[in-house]
Amino acid sequence: MLRICFSLLLACALLPAQKKSAGPNREVINNDLVRVLIANSTPGTKSRPHKHDVNRIMIYLDDGAQQLKFEDGTVKDQQWKAGDVILDPKGGMHTSENKHSKPFRIVEIELKNAGDTVSLSKLDAPQVAPHRYKVILETEQVRVIRARFGPGDRVPLHEHVLPHVVVFLTDYHLGVRGDDGKLVEIEGKAGEAILGGPAKHSETNRTNALLDLVIVEIKSKSGA
C-alpha cells in the first residue's frame, strides 16, 4: 500500500508515484528513480523467462526459497529469512521457481538512477542515533539503512537529505514531529512501502512492540 499522505503531511518533497491494481507482482511506486513491486509467490509457482535490466534491492517479508535457471544452463538456489535485505545485480534471461513450502512476499526496488556522490547532513540518522539506525548496505546508487525502535522509543531530531523508499517490516504507529514543531501521527501495516523526500524531524514509536523498517536512500542530487 502506498501511503502518500505521510510524506505530504511532513511537507517532504515527494517523488511522483502511482499505484496499480493488485496481482502476483503489484506495482506500488514508479518514477524516474525507482520502481517498487510487491511480489507474491505460492509454492511451486514458476515464472516465464525474463531478465532484469537494472540492479534491485530485495527486501524479503517472509522466509522463502527459490531456484533460478538461466538460459546458459546455470542454476542458482536461493534461501532467505524474513527481514533479509540484499542487492540483486542486473542479469540475463532466466526463470524462477518457488521452492518453499509456503507463500512468500518480496519488496523489489528497481534502481533507475545512475548513482551520485552526495553530502550527508550533520544530523544524519545513523550518526544521531547509531543504536537505532544502522547502514547495512551501500553502493554508488543507494544507501540502505535498517532502523529498529523499541516500544515508546524516541529518536531525536535528524535529517534525511536523499529521496528514499521506506519499507515497514512490522505494523507501525509513529509520532513524527517536524523541525517546525508540527506533530503528525502515522500508522499502517507490515509490508507497506512509502516514498519520501528530504525531511528533518524526530520520531516516537507509539506501539507496545518492536518497530522494524528498512530505508532505501536513492543517491541522486537531482531529487525527483
Image (cartoon, helix red, strand yellow):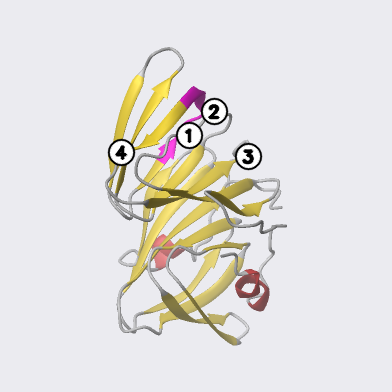
Front-most of residues 124 and 71: 71
Instruction: Please tell me whether mark 3 or mark 1 is closer to you in this view.
Output: 1
> Which span of residues is magenta-colored?
87-94
Q: Residues within 10 Å of mark 3 (few under 14, many from 20)?
A: some
Q: Which mark is residue 47?
A: 1
Q: Is residue 108 above or below residue 54?
A: below
Q: Could you tell me how far apart the alpha carbons at marks 3 and 1 are, in whole angstroms?
A: 23 Å
The tag earlier along the polypeptide, 2 or 3, is 2
Q: Amino acid at mark 3?
A: Lys
Q: CA distance from mark 4 to mark 2?
A: 18 Å
> At label 1, which amino acid type do we have?
Ser
Counting residues from the start of the chain, the first of labels 4 and 1 encountered is 1
Q: Residue at x 65, y 78 (%)?
A: 9
Locate residue 191, reporting x and y percent: 45, 62
Measured as percent of width and height from the top left, residue 178 is found at 58, 80
Among the two numbered marks 3 and 1 on one chain, the one whose residue lies closer to the N terminus: 1
> In this rendering, is residue 132 above or below 26?
below
Which marked residue is nearer to the observer: mark 2 or mark 1? 1
